[in-house]
Amino acid sequence: MLRRIYDWTISLSAHPRAMWALAAIAFIESSVFPIPPDVLIIPMVLAAREKAWTIAAVATIASVLGGLAGYAIGYGFFEAVGQPILAFYNYADKFDQFSQLYNDWGAWIVGGAGLTPFPYKVVTIASGVTQLDLDTFIVASMLSRGGRFLFVAALLWRFGPPIRGFIERNLGMLTIAFFVLLFGGFVVARYML
């Protein structure tokens, strides 16, 4: 079954509307969706290496726009739901301290989450909740998400056929590793933030 899904993803990656699918996945992954756009970036670059830089650019732009949507979710829902709860429990002062600390390190937090398997959506929403400076958020997002997607695209562009062979030979183990990293990111988000 895993092989069929892989083959289907490879065939989807060569579809004329693959860029739109990538943009949609990158957008919603930055605010609510659990699966990162790398799942589509990898087969798209392997299927059309000459489009590697365009693929990375589309993923970056859509991811940052999705990050802005996550920021808006954090900002909007916090006003309606979060603040009354904090006030009820007399935690408004503690939250102000947390917000200040988060904003002091905001560029590094956003940058770190954008580069790693850590769930980026957690940081986009938290940035809205704490009202991280929007310019800082956008620049850190562009640099980190762009760096990540360009790095993946560059590796695949340079080493495409051997990497494709490696992926196909080790598909099961790589899938397990991917989901362990994804789950680990959610665990870190749950217990560290």
Image (cartoon, rainbow, N blue to C red):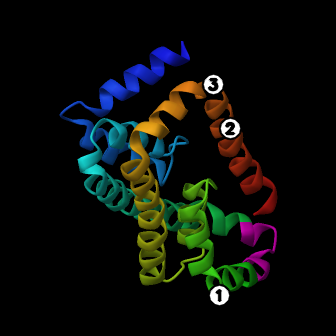
Mark positioned earlier in the residue sequence (2 or 3): 3
Q: Is residue 59 left or right of residue 188?
A: left
Q: Magenta segment range?
A: 86-95
Dividing the image into 4 quarters, which one contains the C terminus? bottom right
Mark positioned earlier in the residue sequence (2 or 1): 1
Q: Is residue 86 above or below residue 116?
A: below
Q: Is residue 40 visible?
A: no
Q: Is residue 152 left or right of residue 12?
A: right
Report how far apart the C-alphas of labels 2 and 3 lie in the structure.
9 Å
Residues under numbered marks 2 and 1 in contact, where contact means CB atoms less than 8 Å apart = no
Q: Is residue 104 left or right of residue 154?
A: right
In this view, the residue in front, 67 or 53, is: 53
Q: Which residue lies under the disc numbered 2?
A: 177
Q: Which residue lies under the disc numbered 3?
A: 172
In the image, residue 6 lies in the stretch drawn in magenta: no
Residues under numbered marks 3 and 1 in contact, where contact means CB atoms less than 8 Å apart = no
Q: Which quadrant would residue 106 be assigned to in this image? A: bottom right
Q: Is residue 82 left or right of residue 25?
A: right
Image point 47% across, 38% down: which residue? Answer: 162
Residues under numbered marks 2 and 3 in contact, where contact means CB atoms less than 8 Å apart = no
Dividing the image into 4 quarters, which one contains the N terminus? top right
Image point 47% across, 45% down: which residue? Answer: 38
Q: Which quadrant would residue 127 be assigned to in this image? A: bottom right
Q: Which quadrant would residue 81 be assigned to in this image? A: bottom right
Q: Amino acid at mark 2?
A: Ala
Q: Amino acid at mark 3?
A: Gly
In the image, residue 87 lies in the stretch drawn in magenta: yes
Q: Is residue 46 above or below residue 54?
A: above
Mark nearest the camera among 2 and 1 is 2
Q: Which SS class for mark 3? A: helix
Q: Which mark is residue 104?
A: 1
Residue 175 lies, in percent from the top left, at 61, 31
